[in-house]
Amino acid sequence: MSQAHLFIIAAASGAGKTTLVKALLNKDRDLQASVSHTTRKPRPGEIDGVDYHFVDEATFIDLKKKGEFLESAECHGGMYGTSKKSVQSILDQKKDVILEIDWQGAQALKAQFKEAVSIFVLPPSVETLAERLNNRGHDSEETIAMRLAAAREEMSHVDEFDYVTINDDFEVALHDLMAIIRSTRLMCHIQLTRHSHLIKNLT
Ligand SMILES: Nc1nc2c(ncn2[C@@H]2O[C@H](COP(=O)(O)OP(=O)(O)O)[C@@H](O)[C@H]2O)c(=O)[nH]1
Ligand SMILES: Nc1ncnc2c1ncn2[C@@H]1O[C@H](COP(=O)(O)OP(=O)(O)O)[C@@H](O)[C@H]1O
């Protein structure tokens, strides 16, 4: 791979971004997800260091003070952050990075990495979003209500993203994401080829 790419995925809670990213990672060995830090408690089945680095508030604040995060934000009453280390370790493996972060994180990373490609995943409807949050079966009623209340705010930032896909039929949304990633890589390859051609003509 000639140049690493940064892909940002955001969506309201329950839209399906984690499930989509997991499916993407299974299909694309050149892609790796950055593991964020969070103060939220693990859900059943979530593994520390795999799904998130689960830390307490004091540790999170300390890491933030030490400048360990590329970006961090408060969301649904918890703190979330992308560490420089988590992104660097992927770049060291010469892989593309995918970050599952909220709109605040997306804004912050876009400001630092202009070439980053951002994708927003919309649910087919707010009713479906509520259904999916309930069916996920991991959150309390209170947590679900908080996430639904935040959904409109998250979705109001959809215009700030480079691409949008609607996660109605899962396979269609997955193919949209794969197409975006493939075309980003191809575009870069075409540019590099064009440049090397120019350079050859000059010498
Ligand atoms: N800014 C930022 N947001 C993050 C990060 N990690 C996760 N998030 C976002 O925090 C929100 C809550 O994530 P989570 O608690 O896993 O709930 P979910 O959205 O219901 O799966 C989601 O919008 C995530 O994309 C991060 O490192 N930085
Ligand atoms: N296209 C889809 N159709 C039906 N259910 C879906 C679809 N995509 C995801 N889900 C389900 O919706 C729930 C929420 O998905 P999840 O990936 O946890 O969302 P998010 O990470 O955006 O909060 C999960 O139970 C998941 O299996």
Image (spheres, rainbow, N blue to C red):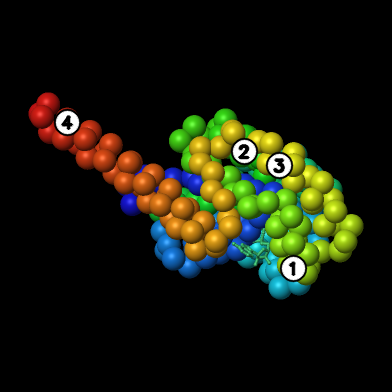
The kind of residue tagged 3 is Glu
The kind of residue tagged 1 is Asn
Residue farthest to the bottom? 45
Circle 2: element type: helix
Q: Nearer the viewer, mark 1 or mark 4?
A: 1
Q: Residue at x 79, y 50 (%)?
A: 148
The residue identified by callout 1 is 135
Q: Is the residue at mark 1 in contact range of ligand 2, meaning its CB lies under 8 Å from it?
A: yes
- Mark with earlier residue (4, 2): 2
- Mark with earlier residue (1, 4): 1
The residue identified by callout 4 is 199
The residue identified by callout 3 is 154
Indicate whether 124 appears above or below 104: below
Q: Nearer the viewer, mark 1 or mark 3?
A: 1
Q: Which disc number belongs to residue 158?
A: 2
Q: Is residue 107 left or right of residue 91?
A: right
